[in-house]
Image: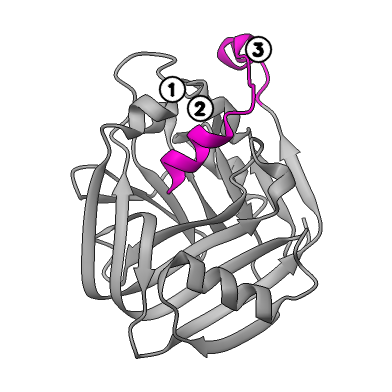
């Protein structure tokens, strides 16, 4: 794949239906990108792909560096070969503030994908991490009902994520979807809220117009799932 093209394995509606027992080796995902996010088998923790390295952020607060991606499976991931076309210093308050900035910075990208990276000292980052399924086919709403939330204040780290157009809701998460990992790679999670405070952080982004989707094969769970759009459920669990 070329730079700044989206590669996605499976769809978010599959996670909503609890399709998470199987998947694809993360090494195969990394063939298509070095920057992104996702989850792990049985939705145990949050995935962040940063500079080609993969980290699993768990509900107990620990972070595991995945050193053998060939033997580690993901049921859902979105990545790209990130090459920024815009770099700046920004201050933002909340996801809405970031959305406003992206709209100004990319006025022609309403119906395109955007990839984002932010590095620096964040005034506040509020995250959640999912503990995983208790039983096979347990849906994402029930899994995230047991999520663990953490708030990091004055934390150096990196934010990785995407803004997806509205028409992909159910395939991916429409709107902003971000994961955070601390500079020391010891803390992180799925972002519910963020603020840079008054101090600007490094910001990089690119607009993307090519989207590659790979669906699971030889997966009975995926074949049996209803995969109906659960827009309100997706919004609830993604924050």
Q: Is residue 69 depicted above or below 155 in this figure?
A: above
Of badges 3 and 1, the one in the foreground is 1
Quadrant assignment for the N terminus: bottom right
The answer to whether residue 145 of the structure is visible from this angle is yes
Say if mark 1 contacts mark 2, CB within 8 Å. yes
- Write down the quadrant of residue 200 in the picture: bottom left
Residue 21 drawn in magenta: no
**Dot 2 crowding, Cα within 10 Å, few <14, some 14–19, many 20+:** many
Q: Is residue 134 depicted above or below 209 in this figure?
A: above
> Which mark sits nearer the N-terminus, 1 or 2?
2
Q: Looking at the image, which residue is at 52% across and 72% down?
A: 98
> Which mark sits nearer the N-terminus, 2 or 3?
2
Observer-nearest of 42 and 27: 42
Q: Secondary structure at mark 1?
A: loop
**Dot 3 crowding, Cα within 10 Å, few <14, some 14–19, many 20+:** few
Q: Alpha-carbon distance for marks 1 and 2?
A: 5 Å
Q: Alpha-carbon distance for marks 2 and 3?
A: 14 Å
> Which mark sits nearer the N-terminus, 3 or 1?
1
Which mark is drawn over residue 16? 2
Of badges 2 and 3, the one in the foreground is 2
Question: Which stretch did the figure color magenta?
Answer: 216-239
Residue for badge 1: 139
Say if mark 2 contacts mark 3, CB within 8 Å. no
Q: Looking at the image, which residue is at 35% across and 25% down?
A: 142
Which mark is drawn over residue 223? 3
Q: Looking at the image, which residue is at 26% across and 69% down?
A: 184
């Amino acid at each position: 794949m070329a730079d700044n093209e989206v590669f996605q394995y499976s769809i978010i509606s599959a996670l909503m239906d609890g399709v998470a027992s199987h998947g694809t080796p993360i090494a195969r995902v990394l063939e298509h990108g070095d920057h992104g996010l996702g989850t792990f088998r049985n939705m145990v923790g949050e995935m962040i792909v940063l500079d080609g390295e993969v980290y699993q952020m768990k509900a107990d607060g620990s972070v595991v560096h995945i050193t053998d991606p060939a033997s580690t499976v993901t049921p859902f991931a979105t990545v790209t070969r990130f090459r920024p076309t815009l770099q700046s210093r920004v201050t933002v308050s909340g996801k809405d503030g970031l959305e406003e900035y992206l709209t100004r910075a990319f006025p022609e990208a309403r119906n395109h994908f955007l990839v984002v990276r932010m590095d620096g000292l964040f005034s506040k980052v509020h995250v959640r991490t999912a503990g995983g399924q208790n039983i096979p086919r347990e849906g994402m709403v029930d899994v995230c009902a047991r999520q663990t939330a953490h708030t990091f204040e004055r934390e150096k780290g990196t934010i990785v994520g995407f803004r997806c157009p509205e028409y992909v809701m159910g395939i991916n998460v429409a709107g902003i979807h971000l994961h955070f990992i601390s500079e020391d790679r010891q803390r992180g999670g799925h972002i519910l809220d963020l603020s840079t405070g008054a101090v600007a952080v490094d910001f990089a982004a690119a607009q993307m117009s090519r989207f590659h989707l790979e669906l699971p094969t030889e997966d009975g769970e995926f074949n049996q799932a209803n995969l109906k759009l659960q827009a309100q459920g997706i919004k609830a669990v993604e924050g």
